[in-house]
Structures are given as C-alpha cells and as structure tokens.
Image (cartoon, rainbow, N blue to C red):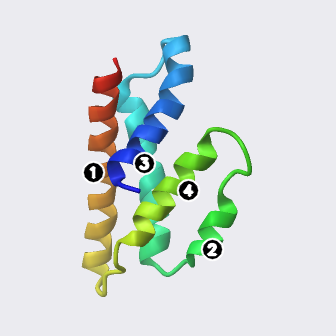
C-alpha cells in the first residue's frame, strides 16, 4: 500500500465527519494524520515489532484500515542505523503523509 493510499484512506476517514461539522481545516486534519505517522514511524525506527503495532489498531471502525495502512507503509521502510537517520526517517514519513493528505483533500473538495 502506498503512502498516497494510506493518506487517502485517513483523509476520507477524517474528512467525512469534519465535512458534516465544518470545523476542521485540511491542515488540522492532515496535521493529526502527521502526528499519527510520527508515532507509527518512531515505533518502527526504535524496534517495536510490527505485530505489537498491529495489536494497537482498533478492532473495528473506519480507523482500523487507516492505522493498518500507516503501519504497512512504515514497516515497508528500512530501519536506519543512526539516531540522525532514524529522526530523518520519522520526519520524512510525517512530511510525506501530510503532503499526500493535503493533496488528497484538495482532490476531494
């Protein structure tokens, strides 16, 4: 699953209720997605097994597909050997997810 698909799933999941309530901007929604991406990639880079991350996923609801997609994307990327490399990977993953999310929302609205 690509970062773009993961972002699209999360964007659609987050955007539907927000569109009804008209409260959150794309930047807020995608910022939340970026925070989740950071948490997932931090766990990836610092050695948390994929199975442990999957165990944290909700058991039902729209969010489960999104969370699993982010986990799949993060765990498809290599663990970096240095602290700087790990931090760069974490921030790069966040930036890619947020950018893809914003691009997806612009395509929806």
Contact? badges 1 and 3 (CB < 8 Å): no
Residue drawn at x 36%, y 80% as measured from the top left: 79
Q: At numbered mark 3, what does the secondary structure look like: helix, strand or loop?
A: helix
Q: Nearer the viewer, residue 42 or 76?
A: 76
Residue 27 appears left or right of 24: left
**Pointer 2 residue:** 51
Q: Where is residue 21 in the image (x, y as percent from the top left)?
A: 55, 13
Number of the front mark, 4 or 1 = 4
Contact? badges 3 and 2 (CB < 8 Å): no
Q: Quadrant of the N terminus?
A: bottom left
Who comes first in sequence, dot 3 or dot 2?
Answer: 3
**Pointer 4 residue:** 68
Determine the CA span between mark 3 and mark 2: 19 Å
Determine the CA span between mark 4 and mark 3: 9 Å
**Pointer 3 residue:** 6
Determine the CA span between mark 4 and mark 2: 11 Å
Number of the front mark, 2 or 1 = 2
Residue drawn at x 26%, y 34% as measured from the top left: 103
**Pointer 1 residue:** 95
Quadrant in the rendering for residue 2? bottom left
Which residue appears farthest toward the bottom when viewing the image?
A: 81
């Amino acid at each position: 699953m690509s970062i773009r698909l993961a972002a699209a799933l999360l964007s659609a999941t987050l955007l539907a209720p927000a569109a009804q309530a008209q409260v959150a901007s794309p930047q807020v929604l995608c910022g939340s997605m970026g925070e989740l991406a950071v948490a997932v990639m931090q766990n990836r880079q610092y050695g948390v097994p994929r199975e442990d991350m999957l165990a944290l996923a909700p058991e039902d609801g729209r969010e489960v597909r999104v969370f699993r997609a982010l986990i799949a994307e993060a765990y498809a990327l290599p663990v970096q050997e240095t602290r700087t490399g790990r931090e760069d990977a974490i921030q790069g993953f966040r930036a890619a997810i947020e950018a893809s999310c914003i691009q997806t929302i612009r395509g929806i609205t």
